[in-house]
């Protein structure tokens, strides 16, 4: 279990975790401990070299032994190598290290202590009194200094101090000095004190590190709460320094003050409010006096003139002080209280108009559209039309230029719509960057088309937004009343479908509602509605398509494929209902059911086969999916190697890091992982290196072109060579002709699946096929492969 910042770190727990724990938080803590030790490395190793030089200078005269010279040379090389190693790694601090780093540091400390311990253990008894005094001081200083320098790694400090103390005890025992025993007792006592102190230093250091992390985490939580407060309320937070300059500027604050963030940073709170203060108002002066007074205040009202008209803002703030009581700024909330000042006018405006653009809102649009539909349904009624407009690239404008510029674009768009529409028509804003125009008294379809073209041409022109030239454009969907709709909701749906078709075909287009669009939408709604009940009604089935080893011509596995047979919708294609399931979230229930069925069939009906199951991006990235997979294997008592998870290349483009982590977790269970539809344009070799797939499945698009296109054969050969180098199996999908099988055999593909062998079938039918398989003939190409095909395969044969 990882530590939390509020836990108390015990001595035993500290030593145990630093020595053996291998979780993320302990690895980070271990890196901090090692970095603290390494910060003093040049000093400790420099002193080591100086001590060696001192020993050579003063003890070398009394010790005439090649062993002493070898010791001095070894210590010099050891210290020099340590300094060189530190110099190379000084600019590469590691944020996390495994347990072996502490063990290695402890080993190094022990070796250094043994090297120093040889000096007193061998030569102390032979030295005269003066040299014994020098050597004794040197040992004591080395022992204490080393234990202190290694205090952040208790095991290393203990090893260093303990081994040096042991060598010193041996030296004292051999010296037969009269005070040897009292000195030995003192040495043991103070070594124990040093080890306890070193452990205490490490524990305090760890506690401080964890406390800092907890403080940082709490700071992030506070920041998230403040952002959540700002996003879910109409109030805007602000903070200024003692000079009145903004400390932080949110997008909402910049939008409220109608200034870009970079320009607002050059102003202070008072200057920004002064620039928008309504003529004849002195409310900013009253706010300045409140700030100068230095005490918290509430509801200082400022009257301002904005692009939306006259507004009233309420300012509430409190002073911020440092530890010495000095003022370090102000923090407060800016609230729009215009509705309280103008309740009836404001409520009436909001009930019928969009506050940003001044256009009719959704309620007003529905009311006018209802009138248009009602008139059009009269025997002599006038025709009408609804146009739904969506600005192109508006999200990019908001993200790159800011919401203030985005709002200015919306306002400029509203102005152009007003100029282009007749007084009898109504233009409004549905929300976001979506607008709508209700046309009354339409004479013919051409009139609506020409009006829509004028809108596209006008809104394609650059817009001057807060001094910046912005180009957007618009896509339009058109629905005629009553030709395409006989109610308000039908009209909105029809125009929205036409708009979707326009944006799908390319931006800046006009889409007209057609019956085909309506039928497609109704079909989609039927599929979505019935799919929610398909599992409960037992309408879904899992079929299996066999996978055959090409060389041995044996069925080695099968791919699980979900099928849906509906009593009224008929056989619904997986291409159709899987997309609906992913968009509605039903894919989680369906995917879990398919996995459960596959595991059950693999255990009971299809023993010995490896079952491959497709897993969608939504499933793989869902919290707890890996645990759910492990529980399924355990419940069905199915060996993990009997299950294979297939993912598509597009998954790796959506959330690479999270996907790779989950795939590694799946492999740790023992489940095989295959990359499906390989070669369709998403894969990167970097992803293949990050995760070692067990199998690459070559997309059927390449197999279908295998006999006609030489480039398809070249691509397949390259894929197979890549898989061979990376140690992965290969499987070709969609094999339908014996000639395709022959080509795959020659270029060294491992296995295949496709209609050439069998279509997907229920599990018991597949079990029957497996029993009859030895009796069935292997499909062979009726004719020799064309010369052109044989020529393109010659290179492949040379590599096999």
Image (cartoon, rainbow, N blue to C red):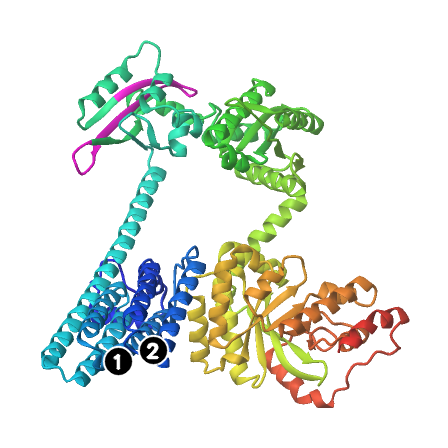
Answer few, some or many: residues within 10 Å of disc 1's Cα (few below 14, many 20 plus, some between 14 and 19). Answer: some
Res. 688 image quadrant: bottom right
Does residue 509 appear left or right of residue 234 in this picture?
right
Q: Nearer the viewer, residue 714 or 798?
A: 798
Does residue 360 appear left or right of residue 5 in this picture?
right
Relative to 396, say whether 345 is above or below.
Answer: above
The residue wearing badge 1 is 123
Q: Nearer the viewer, residue 320 or 737?
A: 320
Does residue 635 appear left or right of residue 655 in this picture?
left
Relative to 289, say whether 630 is above or below.
Answer: below
Q: Main secondary structure of the magenta part?
A: strand
Q: Earlier in the sequence, mark 2 or mark 1?
A: 2
User: In the rendered image, which quarter contains the N terminus?
Assistant: bottom left
Residue 679 position within the rendered picture, expressed as x and y whole percent measured from the top left: 68, 62
Magenta segment: 301-326
Q: Is residue 426 visible?
A: no
Q: Which mark is residue 513?
A: none
Q: Is residue 496 visible?
A: yes
Check if residue 490 falls in the magenta segment: no
Relative to 359, say whether 728 is above or below.
Answer: below
- Disc 2, disc 1: CB below 8 Å? yes
Residue at the image position 50 percent from the left and 30 percent from the top: 406
Residue at the image position 79 percent from the left and 64 percent from the top: 705
Q: Residue furthest right?
A: 787
Q: Secondary structure at mark 1?
A: helix
Q: Nearer the viewer, residue 83 or 654?
A: 83
Res. 302 image quadrant: top left
The residue wearing badge 2 is 68
Residue at the image position 32 percent from the left and 76 percent from the top: 115
Relative to 550, say whether 55 is above or below.
Answer: above
Answer few, some or many: residues within 10 Å of disc 2's Cα (few below 14, many 20 plus, some between 14 and 19). Answer: some
């Amino acid at each position: 279990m990882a530590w939390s910042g509020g836990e108390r770190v015990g001595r035993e727990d500290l030593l145990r975790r630093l020595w053996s724990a291998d979780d993320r938080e302990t690895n980070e803590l271990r890196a901090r401990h090692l970095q603290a030790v390494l910060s003093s490395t040049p000093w400790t190793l420099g002193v080591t070299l100086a001590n060696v030089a001192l020993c050579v200078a003063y003890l070398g005269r009394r010790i005439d032994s090649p062993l002493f010279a070898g010791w001095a040379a070894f210590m010099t090389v050891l210290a020099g190598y340590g300094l060189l190693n530190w110099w190379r790694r000084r600019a590469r601090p590691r944020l996390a290290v495994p347990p072996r780093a502490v063990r290695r540091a402890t080993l190094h400390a022990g070796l250094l202590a043994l090297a120093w311990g040889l000096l007193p253990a061998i030569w102390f008894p032979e030295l005269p009194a003066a040299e014994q005094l020098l050597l004794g001081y040197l040992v004591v200083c080395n022992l204490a200094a080393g234990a202190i320098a290694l205090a952040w790694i208790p095991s290393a400090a203990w090893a260093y101090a303990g081994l040096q103390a042991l060598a010193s005890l041996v030296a004292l025992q051999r010296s037969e000095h009269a005070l040897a025993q009292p000195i030995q007792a003192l040495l043991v006592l103070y070594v124990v004190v040093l080890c306890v102190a070193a452990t205490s230093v490490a524990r305090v250091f760890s506690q401080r590190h964890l406390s800092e992390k907890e403080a940082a985490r709490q700071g992030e939580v506070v920041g998230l709460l403040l952002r959540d407060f700002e996003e879910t309320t109409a109030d805007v937070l602000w903070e200024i320094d003692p000079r009145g300059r903004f400390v932080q500027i949110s997008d909402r604050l910049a939008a409220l003050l109608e200034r870009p963030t970079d320009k607002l940073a050059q102003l202070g709170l008072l200057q920004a409010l002064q620039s928008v203060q309504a003529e004849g108002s002195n409310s900013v002066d009253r706010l300045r006096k409140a700030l100068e007074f230095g005490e918290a205040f509430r509801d200082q009202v400022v009257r301002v003139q904005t692009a939306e008209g006259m507004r009233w803002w309420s300012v509430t703030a409190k002073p911020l002080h440092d530890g010495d009581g000095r003022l370090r700024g102000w923090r407060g909330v800016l609230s729009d209280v215009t509705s309280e000042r103008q309740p009836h006018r404001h409520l009436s405006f909001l009930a019928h108009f969009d506050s940003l653009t001044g256009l009719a809102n959704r309620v007003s649009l529905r009311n006018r559209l209802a009138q248009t539909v009602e008139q059009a349904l009269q025997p002599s009624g006038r025709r009408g039309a609804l146009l739904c407009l969506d600005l192109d690239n508006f999200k990019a404008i908001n993200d790159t230029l800011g919401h203030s510029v985005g709002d200015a674009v919306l306002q400029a768009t509203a102005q152009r719509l007003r100029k282009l529409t007749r007084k009898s028509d109504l233009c409004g804003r549905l929300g976001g960057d979506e607008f709508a125009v209700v046309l009354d008294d339409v004479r013919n379809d051409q009139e609506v088309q020409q009006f829509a073209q004028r809108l596209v041409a006008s809104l394609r022109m650059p817009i001057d937004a807060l001094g910046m030239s912005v180009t957007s454009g618009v896509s339009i969907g058109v629905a005629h009343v009553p030709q395409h709709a006989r109610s308000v909701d039908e009209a909105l749906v029809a125009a929205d479908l036409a708009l979707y078709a326009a944006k799908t075909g390319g931006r800046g287009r006009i889409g007209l509602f057609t019956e085909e669009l309506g039928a497609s939408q109704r079909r989609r709604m039927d599929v979505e509605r019935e799919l929610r009940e398909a599992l409960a009604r037992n309408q879904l089935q899992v079929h299996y398509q066999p996978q055959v080893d090409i060389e041995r011509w044996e069925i080695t596995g099968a791919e699980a494929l979900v099928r849906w047979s509906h009593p009224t919708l008929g056989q619904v294609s997986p291409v159709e209902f899987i997309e609906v399931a992913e968009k509605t979230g039903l894919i989680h229930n369906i995917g879990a059911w398919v996995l459960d069925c596959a595991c059950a069939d693999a255990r009971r009906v299809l023993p010995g086969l490896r079952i491959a199951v497709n897993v969608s991006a939504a499933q793989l990235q869902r919290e707890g999916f890996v645990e759910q997979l492990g529980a399924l294997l355990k419940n069905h008592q199915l060996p993990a190697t009997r299950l294979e998870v297939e993912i598509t290349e597009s998954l790796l483009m959506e959330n690479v890091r999270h996907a790779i982590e989950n795939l590694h977790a799946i492999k740790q269970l023992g489940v095989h992982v295959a990359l499906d539809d390989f070669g369709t344009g998403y894969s990167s070799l970097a992803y293949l290196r990050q995760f070692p797939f067990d199998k690459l499945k070559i997309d059927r698009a390449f197999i279908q072109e295998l006999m006609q296109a030489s480039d398809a054969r070249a691509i397949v050969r390259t894929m197979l060579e890549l898989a061979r180098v990376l140690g992965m199996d290969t499987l070709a999908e969609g094999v339908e002709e014996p000639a395709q099988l022959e080509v795959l055999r020659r270029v060294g593909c491992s296995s295949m699946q496709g209609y050439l062998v069998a279509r997907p079938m229920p599990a018991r039918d597949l079990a029957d096929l497996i029993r009859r398989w030895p009796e069935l003939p292997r499909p062979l190409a009726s004719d020799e492969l064309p010369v052109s095909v044989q020529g393109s395969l010659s290179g492949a044969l040379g590599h096999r």
